[in-house]
Image (spheres, helix red, strand yellow):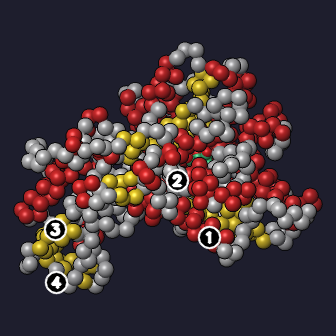
Amino acid sequence: MVNLSINGIAVSVKEGLTILEAAEKLHIKIPTLCYHKDLCIAGNCRVCVVEQTGNNKLVASCATPVSEGMEINTNSLKVRNCRKHIIELLLTEHREECTKCYRNGHCELQELSAEFQITNQDFIDLVPDKNYTVDRISPAIEKDDSKCIRCQRCVRTCAEIQSVGAIAVSHKGSEMKISTFFDRSLDEVVCTNCGQCIVHCPTGALTEKSYVEKVWDAIADPDVHVVVQTAPAVRIGLGEELGLGSGTRVTGKMVAALKRLGFDSVLDTDFTADLTIMEEGTELLTRLKRALVDGDTEVALPMATSCSPGWVKYIEHKYPEYLPNLSTCKSPQQMFGALAKTYYAKNIDVEPQNIVSVSIMPCTAKKFEANRPEMKDSGYKDVDYVLTTRELAVMIKQAGIEFEKLNDEHFDSIMGVSTGAGVIFGVTGGVMEAALRTAYEIVTGREVPFDNLEITPVRGLAGVKEASIQITGTKKEWNFLEGVELKCAITNGLQNAHKLMEAIKNGERTYHFIEIMACPGGCLGGGGQPFPVDNEVRLKRMQAIYEEDRNLPIRKSHENPEIVQVYQDFLEEPLSHKSHKLLHTSYVK
Ligand code: HC0
C-alpha cells in the first residue's frame, strides 16, 4: 500500500493507482477530458492537473502514479487558474455553437466551461481561421472537426476497443487533427459504423446522423401508416437517457410513449429476434447435417451470427474469406422490416408503399444496415428510418411527455409478442443462450436441463467466452448429433472478435457456432445508447436485461405463439422459399 495525502486528507491506496484514482477513493472529483475508464491513459488534455506540494509541480493526475508520502492539492489557486486557462485554450479551437449542437446539454466541455464560469475570451479564437472538415456523407455517423478538442478518445476507442483503426491522428502541432485514410469520408473507409467513437467523444465532434425530423414528418402525414419496432436493449437504455438511472427497465412506459408520439403500430424487434432463432437455429442444424452426415467438406463452420451490422462490416473488411461462415439470416431489424411491408401490411390491409417502417435501436450501425442495397426484399426499403435510443428520448422530450408518470402499455399485435429469449439478444451471449434453449429442445425433445433456463457459461462481460454442450438422447431425426460436443464461442467488442477470428484462422480453436457482437457488452453498450458509459453502467444494463427475461411468461423462442402463427399463416417453415426470399441474404464485399 502507498500512503499519501490529498487536500490534507490521509489515504492509503494500492501501489500503481494514479492520483486520479486515489482521489476518487476520497470522493474528490478531479475534472477530466481525455481520460476514459474504458481506454488507455493518454494524458494529453491536462485538464486533470493537480499540484504536488513540496515541489510545487503541476502534474496530470490521470497519468501520474501515487508515491509514498506524496502531498497533493487538487484545488489550489495555481491548479484552478491552470485548469481555467486550459479550458479557455480548448475553447479557442472549438466552434462554440452550443445552442445548435447535437450534444448541447450532454457535452463534457460545455459542462466544464460552465463549472469554471468561462465567460470571457482571453485568447485569440482560432476556429474561423481553420479549414475544418465536416463530414455528413455516412448514413450513420457525422464527424465535425470544428468541435474536436483532439483528446483522441475516439482514436483510442477505434483502435483499442474495436481494432478497426478507421480514425487516426494526422499532422503535427497546431495542424494536428483526427482524420481518416487520405481524409476521406467515414463512409469510404473501414469504419464499421459501430458508434463507439460517439459514446466516447466528450463533445459534438462525432454524432449519429439524426432522422428525428423525417420521422416527425411521417407521423404527421395522414396518408401513411407508421410502424415502429423497438430493439431489445432500448427498453433498458431509454429510462437512463431520461434521467431514471442506469439499468431501469421501462418497456411498458416506452410503449406508452411511442403511442403518444403518434406511431400507428407499436411493435417489437424481439418478435423477429425469436424468428431469427428459428431460422438461424435451423440453418446451423442444416450445416451440421451437411458436415457430419453428407461429409460435405465445403460447408462453412463455425457458423457465425450475422445480426450485428458492425460485425458484418468488420468481417467484410478484415476477414472476407470468412463471409461464407456468416449465417445467411438477416438481423432481426431487417427481418422485421421485410415482414412489416409484406405479412403485416397484408394483415392490416394497408398497401406496402403506404407503410413507413421506423426502428428504434441502441446502435448507429443499424442506420447503415437499413441503407444497404441488400435490404429491399419486400420490394421497398424494408426499414425506412432508424433512430437511436437517444433520438427517441429527444422526441419524447420534444412532445412534452412526462415519461416517468406514464402507465405501462402493451405492444400491439401481431409482431408484438416476444419471449425472454428475444430480449436477451441485447446482451453479449444472449443470441447463443436463446439459440441453445431452442436447439436443445428441438433436437432432444426434452426441456433444457439448466436451472431456471439460465445458461451461465455464456453470460458476463468477459471478452471471449466459450461453452460446450454434450448432446445426448437426441430424437430419431437428429441422431447424427448423438454424442456430439457442440462447441461455441461468444465475443463482444471487435478487438475480441479479432482475437477470436485469429485463433480460428490459425487453427488454435475450433467451434461449431460463434456469436459476435460489435459493441462492448453487446447491444446494451451500443453506439446509440446514453452517455456516459463504462463497465459499471454496462453491468447494470445487463442485469436489467436478464431481469426482463426472468419476468416474461414465455422464455423460449419456439414457444412464442406469434412465431407459430407467422409460420402457419405466411412463412410455412424455417428456411422455406418465402423465408429465404425475405429473411435471408448474403453479403458480398
Ligand atoms: Fe441488437 Fe438485434 S440484439 S443487433 O444488439 O440480433 O442494435 O438491442 O436490435 O436486429 O433483436 C441492436 C439490440 C437489435 C437486431 C435484435 C439482433
Q: In front: mark 4 or mark 2?
A: 2
Tag 2 residue: 190
* Badge 2 density bin: few <14, some 14–19, many ≥20, Cα 10 Å: some
Q: How far across and down, in percent of the image, does residue 456 sit? A: 62, 66
Q: 567 or 194: nearer the eye?
A: 194
Measuring 50% from the left and 50% from the top, which residue is drawn there? 189
Q: In front: mark 3 or mark 1?
A: 1
Amino acid type at mark 1: Glu
* Badge 1 density bin: few <14, some 14–19, many ≥20, Cα 10 Å: some
Tell which circle, 4 or 2, labels the residue nearer the N-terminal end: 4
Could you tell me which secondary element the residue under label 4 belongs to?
A: loop
Give the CA separation, mark 3 to mark 2: 39 Å
* Badge 3 density bin: few <14, some 14–19, many ≥20, Cα 10 Å: many
Report the side of 70 relative to 295 (left or right).
Answer: left
Tag 3 residue: 50
Tell which circle, 3 or 2, labels the residue nearer the N-terminal end: 3
Measuring 50% from the left and 59% from the top, which residue is drawn there? 164
Tag 1 residue: 502
